[in-house]
Image (tube, rainbow, N blue to C red):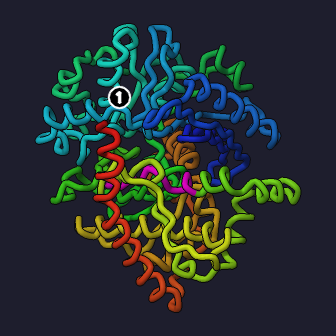
Amino acid sequence: MPLLLGLDIGTTSVKAGVFDIEGHRLGFARHDYALQTPVVDHVELDAETYWDATCAVIQQVLESNDIAGEDIGGIGVSSQGETIIPVDSAGNPIHPAIVWLDNRARDEAQQLSCKLGQTAYHHTGIPDINPTWSACKIAWLHHNRPQVFKSTAKFLLVQDFIIFRLTRQFVTEGSVACTTLLYDIVDYQWWDQALEAIELECERLPRISKPGEVAGVLTSQSAESLNLRSGIPVILGGMDQAAGAVGAGNILPEIVSETTGGALAIQVTVPHPDIDPNERIPVYVHSVPDRYLLVPVCDTGGMALQWFRDIFCSIEIETAIKEDKDVYEVLTQMAGEVSAGCDGLLMLPHLTGAFSPEYNPHARGVFFGFTLYHQKPHFIRAVLEAVAFMLRRNLELIVQAGVTPRELRATGGGAASQLWRQIKADVCQLPVVSLRNYDTAVLGDALLTGVAIGMFKTPEEAVEAMVSTAEKLTPIPANIAVYEKAYQNYCQLNDTLDSVFQRQFGSAEAK
């Protein structure tokens, strides 16, 4: 029976997993990279880094787990959304990738909001036009790098770029394209009004296929770079959030999952795109047919803990290396020594601005309420609790749209921490369920690949075979009251500082 390879290109790492038909993970590897921030609000990456990391991670997952390349029956690819890579006609990058976190295109976002704001949500599912969306980044290139804009043959997303390197096909699909502001999620095609607004011909974008379909087959040149056989089908897995929902078994209405990776995102499967009467929640195209996802997204989730690790935890990194541990295991063990509520210490995790439920690009990270008593473990736990508070704030937005969560399925790297899952259960006052495979995007890619190459008849059949839950954590009664007070304080602090951020950093930017 052929094995299934899932490949997910995230914000700060590429992950690869190999699975059998029953969902057993036979191998997993991760290759990290660092984003480049040459000036304030600019977040870039040499696009070749994505391909180099892809080659490295696939070779690693095969070699370290003694998996033969000829046993791989298909490759499913998913990626982050919004990040733009301008390429020439041969698919070579001609400008660094402008990463989704990049906020340089504020003027272009404002202009597009004036042109498209009244109709954008109904066509794209995007409630607020801001610099995140790909159309704004392309418009910025048009205005500020006119030669790059003129010379670009295709504007690609990260999934599109890797698909091209694997198959030599310029192809995309709605699940990853839905947050470009250029894609009509109702008609499943490029949105003419948005293209006209940024003066872009649709021929300069990839052709549109469907999520979960075969994009092409692995070329002999790419197969040699990856230690695989040529001719392997390559499948369009979609955006990482949608592929992750598939890997969590979240393909039926009103199942709720959350992903704590670099960012924090919540996924709710819905049957049609007009589910939120308040038009506040982003609506994505699902990676399974004829379904959509409500996906509130916060720019910094696990990235906040990664930042704290890199800046303040050199000793813990050394300890982890000596003891052959994951440094995050060391950090969460330290956080576990602190009681719920961090003895009054609060954090706002807006290290790249605030996104959902209130968009404020000028928001900043804050530690609030620390004293001589507070030690490093308090600050680590404050980061974990801040992400849980942000999660609850977005769950309340979903409830306002008419969806009532009964439990949360935890996915992403953050789901590896039992402490973090327990904090989320206590803060949100909901059971939190972990999965046998918590890196669900790579599992979702593999699952969709199994359907595409005929190993399963339907996504539902594949989920039944490949997705398994692991541990269910229920709220600890003694912590509920503590976190209720801490959450209200978090909300008050967030709301109070919102105008301060606007005044202090917005006015500084205007100067």
Which x, y percent locates residue 152? 39, 12
Residue closest to the far right: 322
Vertical arrangement, residue 472 with respect to residue 257, above or below: below
Point 46% across, 27% down: residue: 160
Q: Give the range drawn in magenta.
A: 293-304
Camera-side residue of 365 and 444? 365
* Location of the N terminus (image quadrant): top right
Camera-side residue of 51 and 437? 51
Camera-side residue of 290 and 155? 155
Vertical arrangement, residue 347 with respect to residue 230, above or below: below
Point 18% across, 40% down: residue: 120
Tag 1 secondary structure: helix
Which x, y percent locates residue 478? 53, 91
Is residue 303 located in the magenta-colored stretch of the structure? yes
Vertical arrangement, residue 240 with respect to residue 322, above or below: above
All told, the count of numbered labels is 1
Which x, y percent locates residue 83? 44, 33
Vertical arrangement, residue 410 with respect to residue 490, above or below: above
* Location of the C terminus (image quadrant): top left
Res 458 visible = no
Is residue 432 located in the magenta-colored stretch of the structure? no
- Mark 1 surroundings within 10 Å by alpha-carbon count, few (fewer than 14), some (14 through 19), many (20 or more): many
Point 34% across, 42% down: residue: 508
Point 34% across, 54% down: residue: 501
The kind of residue on which mark 1 rests is Lys
Horizontal placement of 194 versus 492: left or right? left
Question: Which residue is under mark 1?
Answer: 137
Res 452 visible = yes
Camera-side residue of 183 and 351? 351
Which x, y percent locates residue 464? 51, 59
Horizontal placement of 105 versus 265: left or right? left
